[in-house]
Amino acid sequence: MIIKEFVELGQRIEKIWRDKNYSEAVFPDICSDALEEARLPEKISAFEVLRWALRSDTLPEQRDLSAKFGDPPITLYNSQRFHIDVYFWLEGTTTIHQHAFCGAFQVFHGSSIHSIYDFEIEESINCHTELGRIDFLNCELLKVNDIRKILPGRDFIHALFHLDQPSATIVIRTTRSPLHLPQFDYHKPFLAINPFFDEPNTIKKLQTISALMRINAPETESLICETLSNSDFQTAYLILSTVKKHLSSNRLNQIFGHTQEKFNSFMGIVQRRYGSFSDVLPRVFEQEEKIHAITRLRSYVHDNELRFFLALLMNIEGKNRIFQMVSARFPNSDPVEKILDWIESLANTKVLDITLNNALGMEDFSAIDLIALEILLRDLPSEEEGDLLKQYGLKPSEDTRKLLHDRKNKLRQLVILSPLISQ
């Protein structure tokens, strides 16, 4: 039997929307109001939906059978023009995206970091690829019962990073809004690309390159170079992404410094072929490398507070915005003190990784590093540094100040801390 509360919600939305002649312009408001009135998270648990899916002999038509979005996505109600899903999430994702549909979503279980962006297009490569500037607008911490409207296209570019395992979201959405295709993903800081572009020739090239790299075939590098030399810009980016993913997964290459050297040689081919178009790509891959590095560190950490902190570093740029999110989660704590505690804990967390000493990724982290970090986080003037050194039991000698200066520079170079203290 279908969970009746979802059926009642769907029937109510269907009636109200039909009376509005199925206007997409009013659908997000209708969905938001209906979710607010239904208050489903107070009546049903997310786990009840999972039990229902297992026990039901016949499920409603499942709109995302291959689970491209959600782990798993479960459809609970179908109408001619919209449907209601519950998406479960076991891992956070940093994908910035827009939608080719409209509706509303509600946090059903867990919590999420919700970030909003804008994109100013500067160059349209083709209808699947655009260059421009991705601007971070604001962020918020969403908790159970929170509702947000989904607007189609560029009116709602966002990212949801789910903090808890599992998290679950109720989504009411139209089947499609044809005027708002393609449904772009955005790669900071400059690239918009259609992730649903299914051109068979391109897909097979990417699969072939991946296979050649995995078996380390003798002609792999020359074949990749040849393919890049004859590829369009969009395909070249996808090839570079495939190559980067493989090289980053090879730990020996990383130890001996081969990864970046090889990747730079492939990047050089694209830059020579496309000139100014390709100037955006090093920055895009630099950002992706930062996310990859923090994701890897996060995989070693099981403490919920530390995972929350690393999620902030993956999703938010700028220390004041990060302070804001820490205060939202821990309103009775000084955000700087909280962050200093977390960083010290990461430095003391040993990991089973031959390329890392600890979960912070910085060797010999000590009290002088905490002092340097507090100075950077609080923007303390040089005349107040001596007082802080004394609080930690250190004399503000010339040697100590020189060491402090050196440690500040080292902290600034640490990838994991760049969202907090980059200049």
Image: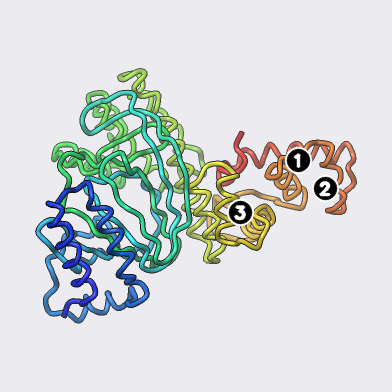
Which numbered disc, 1 or 2, marks the residue that appears first in the sequence? 1
Q: Which residue is mark 2?
A: 388
Asked whether the beta carbons under mark 1 and mark 2 sit within 8 Å of each other, the answer is yes
Q: Nearer the viewer, mark 1 or mark 3?
A: 1
**Does residue 266 appear anywhere in the picture?**
no
- The residue sitting at 52% across, 66% down in the picture is 302
For the N terminus, which image quadrant?
bottom left
Number of numbered labels in the structure image: 3
Q: Which residue is mark 1?
A: 380
Mark on residue 357? 3
Asked whether the beta carbons under mark 2 and mark 3 sit within 8 Å of each other, the answer is no
- What percent of the width, then of the height, locates residue 380? 76, 40
**Does residue 392 appear anywhere in the picture?**
yes
- What percent of the width, then of the height, locates residue 121? 33, 28
- What percent of the width, then of the height, locates residue 209? 26, 40
SS class of the residue under badge 3?
loop
Which numbered disc, 1 or 3, marks the residue that appears first in the sequence? 3
